[in-house]
Amino acid sequence: MNVNAFGGAQAIVNQASPPSVLPQAHAGTLRQFARYAETTGLDLCACLDAELVDWVRRAAELETVPAHVVVDVLEVCAVVGERPDLGIAFAAWSNPRGFGPLSLLWDHCPTFGEVVRVASRFLHLENQALGTVVQRQDDEVSLRHFTAVPARYGSQQFIEATLALDVRLARMMFGEHWAPVRLELNFAAPRIERFRRSFFACPVDYGALQNALVIRKEDMDRLQPHANPSMLAYLEAQLERIALSRPSGLVEQVEQAVLANLPGGAASLDHVAQLLAQSRRTLQRRLGEEGRSFADIVLSVRMRVAEDYFSSEPRPQLTELAYRLGFADATVAGRFLAAHMRPARDMRRRPASGLRKIEMGAH
């Protein structure tokens, strides 16, 4: 997938799962969080239910865990543990190189723009819970994050941790005193926000339409003297081999390619065939041999993306959904919903249940 951080609005949604594959995240995030909890005195057994505790324990031996587990663990621990800034604090404490294979590349990138490019290409190998849209407007670049899996208890902590990690990566390049232009958050201001403002060191816009870090274009382009382009190219090649090995089945490969290129309408048959190093005719024939067609795969992927969107977005917008689904405008997206899915008004966020000690109305 060719994503240019400066080429207008582009999206990274190969993080959402293909309909036949449960979204995964690298277990390094949970391993780090378990160490963070131990260091800071956060009792995970007192906060989490048995299922989530089991996943945290199993993360020590696993390469990946279900992506929603990472989102749920952060959110539940923040509420039950009464730590409203948990996501930011965890990101500030964490080792940026310990989240998964993608983190091995960051030190070698010559610009922050290259960090964004690398993330757009390989993020699905690290955390399929995360989606990102990169937008350029005048001299500013907006890095917007959203959850690409249903979040049973909300995703504020996961999103804030991601935004905080963005800042940490930038400060690794530009120095500890670097600050973004502003932080945009789509939730109301908390009662106490001292730590958030201190960490990000920039204006915070609450009640925004997106969760985004806005930075200067000149910072995206600033060259780093200690970058290692040769090592970056070598590690990219290694990750490319990993990416090509997952998933193994043709249908799953097509589903993943469609998910990666659906936003903006790039998931055409010709483009997907090119990504898979096949001719258009060969790809159609091989899919037919498995009883599938490219059109029905696109349809099933769009339905999954729409369901996840309505399940996880606090303020769904048809124009945003249209972009994620690869439609030219909201009218076409509306017709798609009417023809293939439950009415949009019925696609509310899934009710939270089973969360001990929490009033889930609080967010």
Image: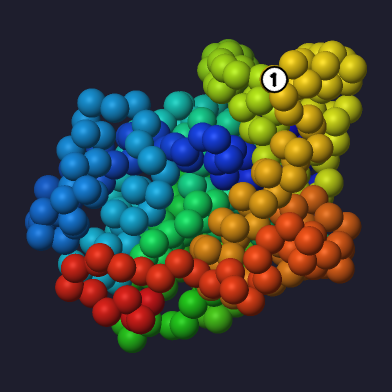
Residue 254 spot, x, y in % from top left? 70, 28
The residue at the point 35 percent across, 36 percent down is 65
Q: Residue at x 52, y 80 (%)?
A: 206
User: 229 left or right of 33?
Assistant: right
Relative image position of residue 186 (x, y in whole percent): 54, 74
Tell me which residue sits at (34%, 48%) in the image.
69
Quadrant of residue 28 within the rendered picture = top left
Q: Of helix, strand and loop, which one carries label 1?
A: loop
Left or right relative to 32: residue 306: right
Residue indicated by mark 1: 290
Disc tally is 1
Quadrant location of residue 327? bottom right
Q: Is residue 203 above or below residue 158?
A: below
Of residue 288 and residue 269, the one placed in the foreground of this image is 288
**Residue placed most toward the observer, 239 or 137:** 239
Judge by depth and name the residue closer to the eye, 92 or 36. Answer: 36
Residue 326 versus residue 272 in the image, above or below:
below
Identify the residue at horizontal 58%, vertical 69% (top origin): 347
Q: Is residue 221 shown left or right of residue 237?
A: right
Tell me the quadrant of the picture where the C terminus can be found: bottom left
Quarter of the image for residue 153 reads bottom left
User: Outermost residue toward the front?
Assistant: 291
Residue 321 at least partly seen = yes
Disc 1 residue type (three-letter): Glu
Please state the horizontal and vertical placement of residue 209, each as a whole percent of the image: 63, 74
Q: How is the image coloured?
A: rainbow
Q: Position of residue 247 (x, y in %)?
A: 56, 22
Residue farthest to the bottom, as pictured: 191
Q: Quadrant of the N terminus?
A: top right
Answer yes or no: is residue 136 visible: no
Q: Nearer the viewer, residue 242 or 104?
A: 242
